[in-house]
């Protein structure tokens, strides 16, 4: 199999890391590979905060739903949707004033379209980092909880109006004790739809997630004394959870801040 495809197919999230140090050369290689990700108009509408201060890492672990593995990870990167750099560049270079004086364009504050592009750039770069890390022997894990407690994160990382978290990754060499078992994925035809959206209903969804459901049933992880479905599991554990309510609240604050300051 092609080496890159082999890396993609064998990748799994890493949550425990060994004490093996990561060399400066390896770290630079990871950074350079990350920056080769596709980016809208080659504008690099993202920035990455590398959190190296241990006190900040520990605080970040608390902010992100109390996950100590964040504080223990050798590399912690917060990917930001970043339009602030271009707002500053447009204004400080005189581009805004020249366009206004020539009658070419009036100033337009960044909107949700800009945010969408910035988010895409940041998340594409993050996935480039994941695959590059795999090639370098580094495990990684996305931390979705980075979109919780936005006010605390904003203060911790000194974020500006047009910089909001899009993704977070932790990296390190995997611990020897970590399981190599991979999580199941849906079959191809459950995700790919030709030419238009095909709304899935119960039969389609049961087939799409049957392997996931049986994997949880084998270890007794389903609700209602292990008689429930995967829908029950995720409805109770994720969809109606306190952390999901906080993610919704926090994201509303982020988007409002981006639009209104």
Image (cartoon, grey):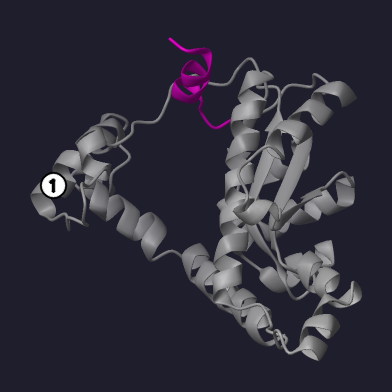
Picture residue at 57% right of the left edge, 21% below the top: 178
Residue toward you, 28 or 154: 28
Q: Position of residue 110 (x, y in %)?
A: 66, 77
Whether residue 23 appears in this view of the structure is no
Name the quadrant of the N terminus: top left
Image position of 125 (left or right of 217): right
Residue located beneath label 1 in the image: 204
Asked where in the image residue 260 lies, by quadrant, the reply is: bottom right
Image position of 107 (left or right of 247): right
Question: Image height check: is 190 above or below 121?
Answer: above
Residue toward you, 77 or 221: 77
Q: Position of residue 168 (x, y in %)?
A: 65, 49
Name the quadrant of the C terminus: bottom right
Image position of 214 (left or right of 28): left
Q: Position of residue 130 (x, y in %)?
A: 61, 33
* The magenta segment: 1-15
Check disc 1: other Cα within 10 Å, few if <14, some if 14-19, many if 20+: few
Q: Position of residue 72 (x, y in %)?
A: 76, 37
């Amino acid at each position: 199999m092609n080496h890159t495809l082999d890396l993609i197919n064998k990748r799994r999230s890493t949550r425990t890391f060994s004490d093996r140090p990561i060399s400066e050369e390896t770290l630079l290689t990871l950074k350079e590979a990350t920056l080769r990700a596709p980016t809208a108009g080659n504008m690099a509408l993202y920035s990455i905060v590398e959190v190296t201060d241990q006190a900040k890492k520990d605080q970040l672990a608390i902010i992100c739903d109390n996950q100590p593995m964040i504080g223990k990870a050798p590399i912690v990167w917060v990917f930001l949707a970043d339009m602030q750099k271009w707002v500053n560049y447009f204004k400080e270079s005189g581009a805004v004033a020249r366009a206004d004086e020539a009658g070419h364009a009036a100033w337009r504050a960044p909107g949700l379209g800009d945010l969408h592009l910035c988010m895409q750039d940041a998340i594409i770069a993050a996935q480039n980092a994941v695959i590059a890390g795999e090639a370098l022997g580094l495990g990684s894990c996305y931390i979705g909880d980075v979109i919780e407690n936005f006010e605390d994160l904003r203060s911790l990382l000194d974020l500006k109006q047009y910089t909001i978290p899009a993704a977070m990754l932790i990296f390190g060499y995997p611990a020897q004790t970590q399981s190599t078992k991979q999580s199941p994925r849906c079959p191809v035809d459950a995700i790919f739809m030709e030419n238009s959206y095909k709304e899935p209903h119960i039969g389609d969804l049961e087939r799409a997630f049957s392997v996931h459901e049986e994997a949880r049933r084998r270890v007794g992880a389903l609700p209602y004394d292990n008689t429930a479905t995967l829908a029950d599991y995720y409805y109770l554990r994720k969809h109606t959870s306190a952390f999901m309510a906080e993610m919704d609240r926090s994201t509303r604050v982020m988007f409002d801040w981006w639009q209104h300051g």
